[in-house]
């Protein structure tokens, strides 16, 4: 018999009619001869409603009590769906996370799954039962082995489902939802969004963590690490949906399901150069002009960052391979003549990166990379982060030294280290999907000391509170007193804790202050073909400029370009960029 794990989301279970329809669907899957483990979310918006109830009592309810409350949502849907199945003559039994043996760490509200003790599930399956398991919840063994109910974090039932599929070595994990699969962007905002037949786990990880709610990023992480075949499809029809693919050569997890060694590898890319344009005008169209002229000059730009500054001026910094530096400078000089500003450049640089799906959601990893470099006396010229990779541009002569220290700290063997890797161009699209993240705020820490370790101090201070910095932009420009600014975005939910922690930190830095920017959104284009295509960034910036949308910050990783723009422009920008890459016409 083939074992399938099928997960049904809240919208698919929003009413009794829908629960009955889902039961019918499960029954016919079962009749095709499959063994079934079904994972469900709470009905409709019930998790939101429970959260609302709590907020009417307390502004800051204890995390443990929130888990007690929220876990009831899934208990309603497992029991009702199981009743519906039994009514249809399909023998079924419901299990809470605890009863299903889902063991998590003890961090209430954001617990990671450690292991799944599958014995009870396997026994029930062998009796021919269909299992209906509560997603989003588990049990921690707590202090002294006393069990406590935990939840995994909002959207976490996808993660429960994929973790079950991995532990049970299921044939595949099917995520049934209210859209036909993973689309090129959010269909609620862009009507012409198209279904993708396939997407790589790396691309999906970026999209999911940058606002594409259709999959929980940790579910993608598990699928990627354990090689689970993951399919996203509609609850209402019988179409194929989207299949997630992952490269065959990644390192498989040995330890806990979500608790593996966070860093899989370390990479050094030599012969890099950085160009910094400073004091250029801050108005729509400048970034577009710059990157269009670079692309006309045949220059392939790798990392880009743009920092916001005092009214009316910006800095844009980017990297190219060293032998394209002269060509790039020619283009920049032409542009500066017409718009004003200064250029500086530096060659003999190296890009050092750590990567691994376990970096996601663990802010301590990036901060310990920065700390390690700073302890070795290495200054970081530029930082680029993605969910699964953190890159630092450093002086070439310190590259090997950095490599050794970082390898030691993350306990990496020679096999996990690559120098100048050759990327395989599989003719993937430069942009496969676009995500809009409305859940971020922008913070700038002004006038921080310009010395090795400042970025790492900020990151580790926030990491102590488990706060991740999402888009980090370190300005190249020094103030008169030789201090610098560092800007970043973080989740709205972390605002209060972050400000508190930062205020404590900057009290040690004379003249430094924290500023929260205007309401912003993050818009990100993701595609595996991006590193092989010249001019992608220019096209994105042009699409924004055409709509007179000003870009506040830019940050990129290899397969992603992210712009921070004003909140009011978010949906318009999403539509523009989507149509600029013709994603509505697949
Ligand atoms: P479920 O209740 O099934 O877990 P979610 O609401 O968590 O469903 O996720 C599905 C929703 O994700 C869709 O209704 C859609 O609006 C939104 N979404 C955002 N980005 C995308 C995308 N790229 N592809 C598909 N859906 C997306
Ligand atoms: N019910 C939980 C939530 O709404 C988990 C989930 O739906 O995946 O976040
Ligand atoms: Mg969901």
Image (cartoon, rainbow, N blue to C red):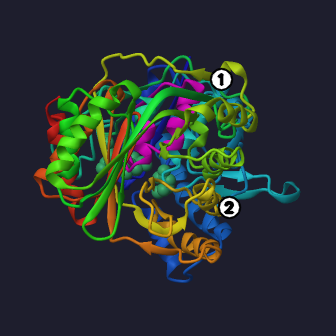
Please give the range of residues in magenta: 204-231
**First in sequence: mark 2 or mark 1?**
1
State which quarter of the image contains the N terminus: top right
**Which residue is most to the right?**
144
Whole-percent x, y for residue 143 in the image: 84, 59
Residue 212 among those drawn in magenta:
yes
Crowding near the residue tagged with mark 2, few <14, some 14–19, many ≥20 C-alpha atoms within 10 Å: few
Crowding near the residue tagged with mark 1, few <14, some 14–19, many ≥20 C-alpha atoms within 10 Å: some
Secondary structure under tag 1 reads helix
Q: Quadrant of residue 319?
A: top left
- Foreground: 389 or 100? 389
In the image, residue 583 above or below residue 426: below
CA separation, marks 2 and 1? 28 Å
Q: Which mark is residue 416?
A: 1
State which quarter of the image contains the C terminus: top left
Q: Residue at x 22, y 37 (%)?
A: 331
Q: Quadrant of residue 267?
A: top right
């Amino acid at each position: 018999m083939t074992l399938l794990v099928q997960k049904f989301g809240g919208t698919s279970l929003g009413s009794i009619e829908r629960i009955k329809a889902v039961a019918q669907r499960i029954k016919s899957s079962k009749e095709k001869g499959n063994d079934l483990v079904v994972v469900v979310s709470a009905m409709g918006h019930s998790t939101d409603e429970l959260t609302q109830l709590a907020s009417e009592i307390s502004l800051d309810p204890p995390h443990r009590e929130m888990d007690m409350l929220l876990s009831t949502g899934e208990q309603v849907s497992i029991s009702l769906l199981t009743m519906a199945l039994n009514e249809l003559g399909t023998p079924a039994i419901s299990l809470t996370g605890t009863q299903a043996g889902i063991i998590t760490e003890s961090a209430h509200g954001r617990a990671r799954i450690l292991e799944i003790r599958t014995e009870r599930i396997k026994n029930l399956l062998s009796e021919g039962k269909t299992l209906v398991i509560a997603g989003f919840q588990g049990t921690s063994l707590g202090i002294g082995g006393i069990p406590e109910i935990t939840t995994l974090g909002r959207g976490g039932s996808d993660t429960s489902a994929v973790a079950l599929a991995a532990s049970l070595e299921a044939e595949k994990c099917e995520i049934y939802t209210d859209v036909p699969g993973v689309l090129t962007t959010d269909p609620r905002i862009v009507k012409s969004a198209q279904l993708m037949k396939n997407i790589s786990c790396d691309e999906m990880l970026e999209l999911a963590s940058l606002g594409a709610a259709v999959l929980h990023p940790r579910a993608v992480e598990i699928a990627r690490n354990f090689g689970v075949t993951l399919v996203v499809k509609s609850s209402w029809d019988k179409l194929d949906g989207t299949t997630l693919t992952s490269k065959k050569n990644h390192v498989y997890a040995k330890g806990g399901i979500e608790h593996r060694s966070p860093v899989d590898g370390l990479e050094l890319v030599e012969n890099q150069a950085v160009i910094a344009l400073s004091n250029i005008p801050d108005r729509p169209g400048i970034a577009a002009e710059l990157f269009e002229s670079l692309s006309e000059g045949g220059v392939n730009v790798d990392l880009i960052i743009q920092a916001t500054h005092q009214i009316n001026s910006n800095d844009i910094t980017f990297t190219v391979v060293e032998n394209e530096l002269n060509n790039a400078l020619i283009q920049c000089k032409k542009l500066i003549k017409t718009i004003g500003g200064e250029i500086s450049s530096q060659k003999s640089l190296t890009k050092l990166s750590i990567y691994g799906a376990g970096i996601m959601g663990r802010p301590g990893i990036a901060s310990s990379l920065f700390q390690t470099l700073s302890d070795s006396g290495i200054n970081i010229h530029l930082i680029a982060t993605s969910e699964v990779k953190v890159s630092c541009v450093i002086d070439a002569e310190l590259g090997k030294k950095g490599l050794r220290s970082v390898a030691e700290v993350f306990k990496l063997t020679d096999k996990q280290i690559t120098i100048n890797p050759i990327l395989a161009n599989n003719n993937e699209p430069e942009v496969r999907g676009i995500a809009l993240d409305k859940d971020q705020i922008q913070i700038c820490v002004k006038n921080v000391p310009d010395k090795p370790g400042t970025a790492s101090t900020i990151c580790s201070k926030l990491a102590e509170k488990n706060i991740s910095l999402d888009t980090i932009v370190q300005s190249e420009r020094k103030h008169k007193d030789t201090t610098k600014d560092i800007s970043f975005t973080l989740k709205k939910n972390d605002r209060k804790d972050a400000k508190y922690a930062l205020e404590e930190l900057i009290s040690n830095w004379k003249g430094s202050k924290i500023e929260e920017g205007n309401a912003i959104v993050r818009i990100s284009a993701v595609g595996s073909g991006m590193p092989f295509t010249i001019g992608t960034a220019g096209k994105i910036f042009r699409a924004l400029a055409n709509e007179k949308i000003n870009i506040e910050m830019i940050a990129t990783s290899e397969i992603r370009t992210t712009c921070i723009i004003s909140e009011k422009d978010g949906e318009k920008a999403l539509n523009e960029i989507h149509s600029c890459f013709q994603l509505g016409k697949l």
